[in-house]
């Protein structure tokens, strides 16, 4: 049958994996109704005993593998994402250095899960697949007249002065290159990753950062083709990986939960109820936070995995001290957390920007119900969330930028 239809091994695996997604979805469907979104059949180790059993570490180490002290810290986290900058000071391709980090972590914590970082919009030059992009211009996004478009990414990582190419996900060859890179990472030879973290996952739009007509002129028709190609790529990632691997879409620029229709895990934003460098907690920032909380609740309730990552405020005159920034982000996580929800907090995207907070060791216990919403009494419109756990009470006033966690229950 496979020979008659001329299926490739990947296509056959994709068919089997899609069947697995349906089985996993059936397992969480109410009254026999299959949800129209993928859900995982396996998840990282976690429980409600304490916050530290539900945290993730996202980053990399530019000098290479972790020393004994760093590894002991990393092994406390049940999930480790390995970023593109892993071993950037050393020769070689990112895929190989990331695989070495995954193996080091798994040796220290065999039950822990690792995630392979890749950007499905930007062609970062440290990856082996960058060589393919240089050899085949059709793998990259071009203007209507055939000029290769370029963008800049996070400038804390090395990149060409003129910017990087963008992946043309309307090209089936690009789709296969991206998805096969992820699947290879899940093999023992590729590092034994438990899934892939897809940065810039929101499908292409003319309003995508860097996607304005001035930076990459193209017709509306071609833009729509890129959009549909991006959606198909997400579907293929999940189908190829299957429900026992996490496909994590970071979707923060184009709606906090859109991609949850195509993959089983969402990373809502770099800055969950936080900001990179804000000097004030204004109405727009508060509205974004409330939108993130509500998206986390929706996704969490349907048994998909949610990553909520707070970011330290790096402004010269930040809106609040770091202790308040951390407490607010953690409290915002707790009011939105469901069984498959995880929390992270860092200052930047290298491992040395993360620490183990005292709050991670506090007894938490199961939630005693959903968050209760009331209207803020501040002079700004917005929501106050309160929620009780077996060993904690949480209060978050979003517009007032005020939060508290009482661990004395």
Image (spheres, rainbow, N blue to C red):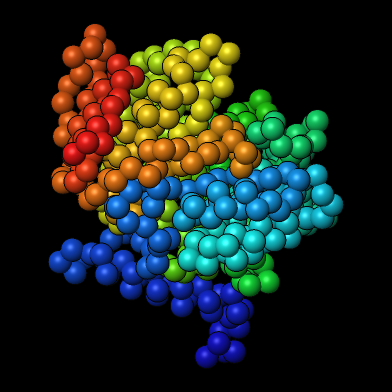
Residue 376 on image: x %, y %:
20, 18
Residue at (36, 61) in percent of width and height: 39
Q: Which residue is more in the foreground, 199 or 57?
A: 57
Q: Residue furthest top?
A: 379
Give me the residue at 48% from left, 66% from top.
111
Q: Is residue 298 visible?
A: no
Q: Position of residue 9 (x, y in %)?
A: 60, 79
| Residue 176, image x, y percentages | 63, 63
Residue 109 shows up from this direction: yes
Pick the front one: 131 or 248? 248
Q: What residue is at 73 percent from the left and 60 percent from the top?
A: 96
Q: Is residue 48 left or right of residue 62?
A: left
Residue 151 drawn at (x, y percent): 69, 34
* Side of 368 where 222 appears, left or right: right
| Quarter-of-image position of residue 196 | bottom right
**Quadrant where the C terminus lies?**
top left
Judged left or right of residue 347, residue 55 is left
Q: Is residue 394 above or below residue 258?
A: above
The answer to whether residue 30 is above or below residue 151 is below
Relative vertical location of residue 160 with respect to residue 41 in this rendering, above or below: above
Q: Residue shown at 49%/61% (left/top)?
A: 112
Image: 8 above or below 160: below
Number of marks in picture: 0
């Amino acid at each position: 049958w496979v020979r008659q239809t001329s299926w490739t091994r990947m296509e056959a695996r994709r068919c089997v994996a899609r069947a697995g997604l349906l089985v996993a979805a059936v397992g969480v469907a109410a009254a026999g109704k299959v949800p129209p979104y993928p859900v995982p059949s396996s998840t990282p180790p976690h429980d409600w005993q304490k916050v530290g059993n539900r945290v993730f570490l996202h980053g990399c180490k530019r000098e290479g593998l972790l020393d004994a002290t760093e590894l002991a810290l990393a092994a406390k986290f049940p999930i480790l994402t390995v970023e593109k900058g892993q071993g950037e000071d050393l020769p070689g391709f990112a895929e190989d250095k990331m695989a070495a980090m995954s193996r080091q972590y798994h040796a220290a914590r065999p039950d822990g899960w690792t995630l392979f970082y890749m950007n499905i919009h930007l062609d970062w030059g440290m990856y082996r697949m960058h060589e393919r992009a240089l050899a085949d211009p059709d793998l990259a996004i071009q203007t209507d007249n055939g000029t290769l478009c370029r963008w800049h990414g996070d400038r804390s990582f090395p990149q060409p002065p003129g910017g990087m190419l963008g992946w043309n996900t309307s090209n089936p060859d690009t789709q296969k290159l991206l998805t096969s890179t992820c699947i290879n990472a899940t093999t023992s030879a590729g590092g034994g990753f438990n899934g892939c973290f897809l940065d810039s996952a929101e499908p292409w739009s003319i309003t995508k950062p860097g996607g304005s007509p001035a930076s990459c002129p193209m017709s509306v028709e071609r833009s729509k083709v890129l959009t549909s190609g991006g959606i198909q790529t997400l579907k293929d990632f999940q189908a190829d990986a299957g429900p026992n691997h996490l496909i994590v879409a970071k979707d923060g620029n184009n709606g906090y939960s859109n991609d949850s229709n195509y993959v089983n895990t969402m990373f809502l934003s770099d800055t969950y109820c936080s900001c990179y460098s804000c000097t004030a907690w204004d109405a727009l920032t508060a509205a974004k936070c409330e939108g993130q909380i509500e998206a986390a609740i929706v996704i969490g309730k349907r048994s998909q995995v949610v990553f909520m990552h707070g970011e330290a405020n790096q402004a010269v005159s930040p809106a609040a001290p770091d202790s308040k920034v951390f407490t607010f982000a953690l409290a915002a996580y707790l009011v939105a957390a469901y069984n498959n929800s995880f929390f992270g907090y860092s200052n930047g995207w290298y491992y040395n920007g993360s620490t183990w907070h005292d709050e991670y060791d506090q007894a938490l216990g199961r939630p005693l119900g959903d968050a209760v919403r009331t209207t803020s009494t501040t002079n700004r419109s917005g929501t106050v969330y309160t929620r009780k756990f077996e060993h904690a009470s949480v209060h978050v006033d979003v517009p007032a930028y005020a939060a508290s966690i009482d661990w004395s229950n």
